Image (cartoon, rainbow, N blue to C red):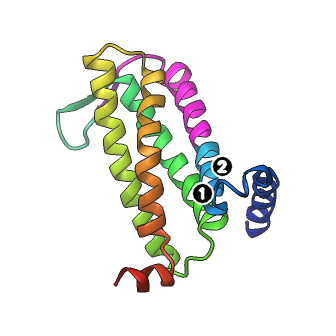
Amino acid sequence: MNKLAQIITKIIDFFYRPFEKRIPRQLFRYAACGGGNLVLDWILYFITYNFIVGHDLVYFHLPFTNYHLCITPHIAALCIVFPITLLTGFWLQKYVTFTASKLNGWRQLGRYTLIVIVNLLINYYGLKLCVETMGWYPTPSKIVITLLTVVISYFCQKYYTFRVKTQIANNK
């Protein structure tokens, strides 16, 4: 897997050359990895919403009860896509963007997951607001909400999830 990370890093760094004087390398890598994962998220969401869930309500029988849970199709698509892009995003950020961090990998994954869950909640309530209250289409709603969470996510990942020892010493 490290070989794949090295290949991805070399490709991203090749495209970084024209931006060297204007954008820090780490920010460029974050944008490239996050952007790639974001596009993957949008494509998977579109496919899941339109072809897997099929615009229908999704019903789950709750085990050991007589109750059923009903999930709207745009939220069901979000729940299906979430674990996939959680793992691909973490891998890219850990092995391509924030490689200097010496924090334990499991600790990083826990922190990353916490930040992503916050973003998931923003996505959930944002989709509810945009689709169900404002009447927007689900896919454009997802795109707008995700763009908002990208900014929040960068600072959280840089200063919390993957922070390096020098950052910790400077913050004390």
Residue 93 location, quadrant: bottom right
Residue 2 location, quadrant: bottom right
The mark that comes first in sequence, 1 or 2, is 1
Q: Residue furthest top?
A: 135
**Amino acid residing under circle 1:** Leu
- Magenta span main SS: helix
The nearer-to-camera label among 1 and 2 is 1
Residue 168, given in percent of the width and then of the height, sits at 42, 82
Question: In the shown orientation, is residue 124 left or right of residue 85?
Answer: left
- Magenta-colored stretch includes residue 39: yes
Question: Can you identify the residue that label 1 sits on?
Answer: 27
Question: Can you identify the residue that label 2 sits on?
Answer: 32
Image quadrant holding the N terminus, namely bottom right
Identified at 64% across, 44% down, the residue is 36
Residue 108, given in percent of the width and then of the height, sits at 47, 71
Q: Nearer the viewer, residue 118 or 14?
A: 14
Tell me where the magenta segment starts and ends, as one range: 38-60
Do the residues under discs 1 and 2 have CB atoms within 8 angstroms? Answer: no
